[in-house]
Image (spheres, helix red, strand yellow):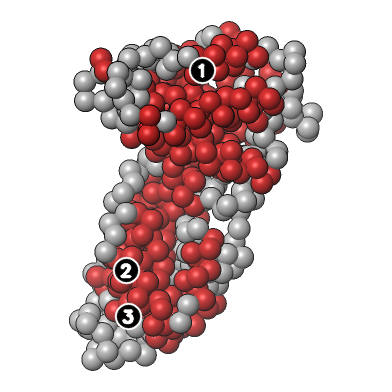
């Protein structure tokens, strides 16, 4: 099992060009000057918030938007003029995909900063809400989108001092706590900000709640936390066992308490998962594979920005699919890998690896349609309602991997990139009936590209490489 180091660095909002907390507050003060005639939202019985009222109950966690867009698109939005921004926002609003709705939300938010329009801030919130529905609470991106929603709602609450807005912010913040894993590094901050929001609501002149609601909420959260402690303890046991077995600890820890005294980082979890996967490779113990996946699923929720952890989890899901043929594992690996690629920068160190794995995942799902038979020997004519879409995507990602390798020259086994592309293209030839009697030779493009890819793979092999025999045998089939 090859390993890649996790991507543990995390850019701040300022580094990616998002407004800082101070800039957000400045914008909020500008927006607060809007009269009821300038906004389509009703002004109820609220009064402007005094700065002193925010000193104790101001959130410290929900003050920055998470950067969830491709870097180029993000930069384009933040540098656009108001007219261009509105055109982009309206265009994106017509596309229901999560990526477009996120771009739409960011564009309307940028507009609200430029023109102090509460209506545009409302539109930013609505688009962010639509984006959230594309994901399940168990997916890492759900928490990031939800954090942005709470942040936007808080901004609106400080502008309008509308009790309904405040209660909506509180409801979303409470939802966030409910889906936060017990060992998540942000759990305490989310909990504390939720209590701050309750305190903010209590001080509202029209609020009927008092300290009792804060105490009740705190008791409820404590009970929920106790319920999650068993899960948290199990996670620690998995990590400590792996570290003790591999001896990677650098602090001379001798007991579980010593191991647990150190901060839980993405790197620690990464190496723990790698340990269990290696153990599975060596022993075939499915229990170890299950532990690796369980730990990986928790890890990507605790460290949602770590592409390295996601890469490891998706590979583990693919491994379990190969063992159990449970297609849901393969579907999760494909869906998760696609989402990572959508937001990964073009020069990211793991981009090529994700293309390689996605090509393999799609090819495996294509083979699943015909009983996982070898693609060189399969007969697509015997498959009812065959869907070629997965095969097309496997070819797309295989070509993308080769294109990146041509620029970077850093993939350990470049011959495999060409060999796999040759296989996928050959499979599509068979799926399209290219070898059927009377088929037109005008459609030989895939076959010619497949042959060329196989030849390149053979040329890249060392003379004594063990893969040579397999490569040559399959290349011979293409020459028939």
- Give the left or right position of residue 479, taking residue 169 as reference: right
Instruction: Please give the residue where the numbered disc 2 appears in the rendered image.
Output: 91
Q: Counting other residues with Cα less than 10 Å from the Cα at mark 3, is it few (<14), some (14-19), or many (20 or more)?
A: many
Q: Counting other residues with Cα less than 10 Å from the Cα at mark 2, is it few (<14), some (14-19), or many (20 or more)?
A: few
How far is disc 3 from disc 1 in space, using C-alphas? 67 Å
How far is disc 1 from disc 2 in space, using C-alphas? 49 Å
How far is disc 2 from disc 3 in space, using C-alphas? 20 Å
Which of the two discs, 1 and 2, sits closer to the camera? Answer: 1
Q: Earlier in the sequence, mark 3 or mark 1?
A: 3
Q: Counting other residues with Cα less than 10 Å from the Cα at mark 1, is it few (<14), some (14-19), or many (20 or more)?
A: few
Helix, strand or loop at label 1? It is helix
Q: Residue at x 33, y 65 (%)?
A: 92
Where residue 437 appears, x then y in whole percent?
30, 18
**Is residue 2 something one can see in this rendering?**
no
Instruction: Please give the residue where the numbered disc 1 appears in the rendered image.
Output: 479
Helix, strand or loop at label 3? It is helix
Quadrant of the rendering where the N terminus is positioned = top right
Q: Earlier in the sequence, mark 2 or mark 3?
A: 2
Q: Earlier in the sequence, mark 1 or mark 2?
A: 2
Instruction: Please give the residue where the numbered disc 3 appears in the rendered image.
Output: 118
Q: Residue at x 63, y 10 (%)?
A: 469
- Give the left or right position of residue 369, taking residue 351 as reference: left
Work out whether residue 242 or residue 412 is closer to the camera in this orientation and state it.
412
**Is residue 48 something one can see in this rendering?**
yes
């Amino acid at each position: 099992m090859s390993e890649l180091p996790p991507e543990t660095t995390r850019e701040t909002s300022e580094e990616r060009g998002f407004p800082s907390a101070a800039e957000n507050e400045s914008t909020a003060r500008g927006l607060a000057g809007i009269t009821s005639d300038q906004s389509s939202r009703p002004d109820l019985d609220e009064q402007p918030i005094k700065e002193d009222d925010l000193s104790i109950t101001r959130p410290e966690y929900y003050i920055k938007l998470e950067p969830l867009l491709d870097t180029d698109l993000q930069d384009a939005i933040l540098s656009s003029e108001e007219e261009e921004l509105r055109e982009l926002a309206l265009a994106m609003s017509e596309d229901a995909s999560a990526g477009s709705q996120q771009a739409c939300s960011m564009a309307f938010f940028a507009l609200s900063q430029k023109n102090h329009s509460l209506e545009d801030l409302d539109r930013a919130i609505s688009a962010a809400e639509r984006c959230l529905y594309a994901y399940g609470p168990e997916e890492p991106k759900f928490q990031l989108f939800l954090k942005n929603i709470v942040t936007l709602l808080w901004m609106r609450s400080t502008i309008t001092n509308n009790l309904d807005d405040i209660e909506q912010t509180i409801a979303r913040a409470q939802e966030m706590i409910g889906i936060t894993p017990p060992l998540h590094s942000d759990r305490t901050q989310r909990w504390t900000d939720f209590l701050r929001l309750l305190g903010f609501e209590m001080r509202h002149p029209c609020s009927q709640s008092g300290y009792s609601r804060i105490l009740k909420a705190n008791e409820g959260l404590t009970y929920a936390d106790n319920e999650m402690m068993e899960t948290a303890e199990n996670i620690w046991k998995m990590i400590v066992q792996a570290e003790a077995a591999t001896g990677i600890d650098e602090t001379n820890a001798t007991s579980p308490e010593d191991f647990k005294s150190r901060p839980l980082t993405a790197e620690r979890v990464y190496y723990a998962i790698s340990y269990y996967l290696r153990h599975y490779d060596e022993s075939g113990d499915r229990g170890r594979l299950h532990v690796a996946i369980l730990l990986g699923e928790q890890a990507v929720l605790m460290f949602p920005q770590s592409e390295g952890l996601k890469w490891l989890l998706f590979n583990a899901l693919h491994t379990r699919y190969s063992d159990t043929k449970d297609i849901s594992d393969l579907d999760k690996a494909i869906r998760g890998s696609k989402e990572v690629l959508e937001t990964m920068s073009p020069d990211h160190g793991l981009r090529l690896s994700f293309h390689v794995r996605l090509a393999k995942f799609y090819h495996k799902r294509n083979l699943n349609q015909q009983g996982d038979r070898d693609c060189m020997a399969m007969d697509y004519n015997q498959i009812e309602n065959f869907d070629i879409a997965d095969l097309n995507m496997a070819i797309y990602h295989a070509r993308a991997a080769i294109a990146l390798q041509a620029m970077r020259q850093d993939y350990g086994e470049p011959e495999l990139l060409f060999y796999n592309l040759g296989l996928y293209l050959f499979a599509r030839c068979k799926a399209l009936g290219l070898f059927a009697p009377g088929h037109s030779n005008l459609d030989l493009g895939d076959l010619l590209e497949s042959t060329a890819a196989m030849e390149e793979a053979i040329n890249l092999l060392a003379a004594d490489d063990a893969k040579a025999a397999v490569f040559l045998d399959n290349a011979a089939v293409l020459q028939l």
